[in-house]
Image (cartoon, rainbow, N blue to C red):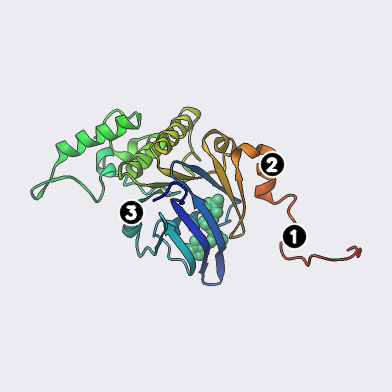
Amino acid sequence: MSDQQPLVELRGIRKSFGPVRSLDGVDLTLARGEVLGLVGDNGAGKSTLMKVLAGAVRHDDGDILVKGEKARFASPADARRAGIGIVYQDLALCDTLDVAGNLFLGREPRKGPFLDRREMHARSARILADLHVRVTSTRQEIGTLSGGQRQTVAIARAVSTRPDVLILDEPTAALAVAEVESVLRLIGEVAARGVGVILITHRLQDLFRVCDRITVMYEGRSVDDARISDLDIEKLVALITRADAEPAHEPAALGTETHS
Ligand SMILES: Nc1ncnc2c1ncn2[C@@H]1O[C@H](COP(=O)(O)OP(=O)(O)OP(=O)(O)O)[C@@H](O)[C@H]1O
Ligand SMILES: [Mg+2]
């Protein structure tokens, strides 16, 4: 793969759920080592688009290219094999399992027919230490962790599968200041290893901390793409709310006629 070739390219992605058109032609590109912010109002289609990329939702039309090759994912497992890791907006951790059990859910190390618990806990401790995640014990039940600890465990699980692409859907929505900091640092570290990160967040200030570029969605379409260094908060808000956008489907020439 050449350096110029995008890691991921989405072209004209469309998806309807019955009469609801959630995605109406979305384009997006992501490079290696890049952190891309995906922004837009509630219901703009961000989570749906990322579920398409992660194989959890099948799109109706459009192309997914990963490292230049067309992909069509029939399942999340397919997308995982292609190097796509995702932390869903609703986390999807198993409350009754401990930290290690969640980190290795579905891919537990085995010794013959048995679960190799010792190995699982040792590897879990290494993964968490690598990512500077602080939990007291890998034997602690997930349900007893704080929101921030749960969040970092969910991210650690996705990161530990060594994805080429890491999708984080609202990873900091419910976090306190220190916890947000640790997630943002984690994003930086992962990107520095060459992983392409897509970050969905409504915390606009975070985008300026970690993103290289942003893609703006509006009503199921990708409407803007900008380098974060060309923006400030006001400009970004204007892009998201379409404050100074041309009306989308208005005829170009209306003459001097005024509406009253
Ligand atoms: N399984 C589904 N069935 C029907 N409609 C759906 C389904 N999933 C998503 N939608 C609709 O698609 C649209 C986009 O939803 P999506 O969750 O992608 O938005 P979002 O940009 O992630 O919003 P938020 O910022 O609130 O998380 C919404 O109108 C939503 O109701
Ligand atoms: Mg969402």
List x then y, in percent, for residue 149. 38, 34
Q: Residue at x 35, y 32 (%)?
A: 131
- Name the residue nearer the viewer: 198 or 169: 198
Q: Amino acid at mark 2?
A: Lys
Q: Are marks 2 and 3 in contact (CB under 8 Å)?
A: no
Question: Marks 2/3: CA distance?
Answer: 35 Å
Is residue 159 depicted above or below 8 in this figure?
above
List x then y, in percent, for residue 238. 70, 46
Quick check: 38 left or right of 88?
A: right
Of label 2 and label 3, which has the lower sequence position? 3
Neighbour tally class for label 2: few under 14, some 14-19, many 20 plus, Cα within 10 Å: few
Residue 152 sits in quarter: top left
Q: Residue at x 36, y 42 (%)?
A: 154
Quick check: 19 left or right of 127?
A: right
Residue wearing tag 3:
80
- Name the residue nearer the viewer: 47 or 52: 52
Of label 2 and label 1, which has the lower sequence position? 2
- Name the residue nearer the viewer: 166 or 132: 166
List x then y, in percent, for residue 104. 25, 45
User: Which residue is at the far bottom?
Assistant: 18
Residue 54 sits in quarter: bottom left
Q: Amino acid at mark 1?
A: Pro
List x then y, in percent, for residue 111. 10, 45
Label at residue 203: none
Is residue 138 visible in the rendered image? The answer is no
Label at residue 235: 2
User: Which residue is at the far left?
Assistant: 112
Label at residue 247: 1
Q: Secondary structure at mark 2?
A: helix
